[in-house]
């Protein structure tokens, strides 16, 4: 196992229509390495990819005291919810309780990167939207059929 955390999977294009009640079905998954304190780490993604306005934007920032056991999986959802963990899988949410969330990841492809507290890139991975990991709001085991891009 790598000593650094890494981006393992993402569901950037869940099956079905992109409606407001389904934000948490979009997620990014990390695997924690032996360095388990993620306080101050940032997960970014590209906005306006393949355009002149392309830029990195913060998807999620880990707060103080965010430590996980080596090898744990952290699934970061695009909606709101209560942080929770079950065994070796932990769920985090980009929106605050009073917010709903929003569709943040680009259905037809997105790049996700992870920066340490000093701003040094730890990992980066590109996703096409057809990886097939999308099997539900809690981070599925995949693979499944490629989802069709649909908007409400």
Image (cartoon, rainbow, N blue to C red):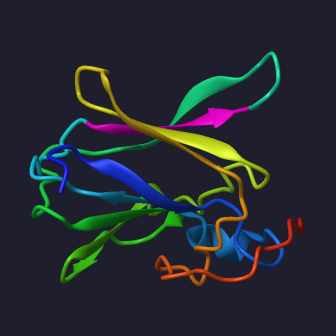
Q: Position of residue 63 (x, y in %)?
A: 23, 45
Q: Quadrant of residue 47?
A: top right
Instruction: Name the quadrant of the N terminus.
Output: bottom left
Q: Main secondary structure of the magenta part?
A: strand
- Say which of 64 and 150 sits in front: 150
Q: Position of residue 59 (x, y in %)?
A: 50, 43
8 w.r.t. 86: above or below: above
Q: Residue at x 56, y 70 (%)?
A: 24
Q: Is residue 43 left or right of residue 50?
A: left
- Say which of 30 and 142 sits in front: 142
Q: Quadrant of residue 79?
A: bottom right
Q: Is residue 34 left or right of residue 127?
A: left
Q: Position of residue 77 (x, y in %)?
A: 49, 63
Q: Is residue 62 left or right of residue 142?
A: left
Does 87 appear in magenta? no
Q: Quadrant of residue 97?
A: bottom left
Q: Farthest residue in the front direction?
A: 1
Q: Is residue 40 left or right of residue 102?
A: left
Q: Position of residue 44 (x, y in %)?
A: 49, 37
Q: Residue at x 59, y 80 (%)?
A: 143
Instruction: Name the quadrant of the C terminus.
Output: bottom right
145 w.r.t. 118: above or below: below
Q: Which residues are magenta?
A: 41-47
Q: How many marks?
A: 0
Q: Residue at x 72, y 64 (%)?
A: 130
- Say which of 104 and 113 sits in front: 113
């Amino acid at each position: 196992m790598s000593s650094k955390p890494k981006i393992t999977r993402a569901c950037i294009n869940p099956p079905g229509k992109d409606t407001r009640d389904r934000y948490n079905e979009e997620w990014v998954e990390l695997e924690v390495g032996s360095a388990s304190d993620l306080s101050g780490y940032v997960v970014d993604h590209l906005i306006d990819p393949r355009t002149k306005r392309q830029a990195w934007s913060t998807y999620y920032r880990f707060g103080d005291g965010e430590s996980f056991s080596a090898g744990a999986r952290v699934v970061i959802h695009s909606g709101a919810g209560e942080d929770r963990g079950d065994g070796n899988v932990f769920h985090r949410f980009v929106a605050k309780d009073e917010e709903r969330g929003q569709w943040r990841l680009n259905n037809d492809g997105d790049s996700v990167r992870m920066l340490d507290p000093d701003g040094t890139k730890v990992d980066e991975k590109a996703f096409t939207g057809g990886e097939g990991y999308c099997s539900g709001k809690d981070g599925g085991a995949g693979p499944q059929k490629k989802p069709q891009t649909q908007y409400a």
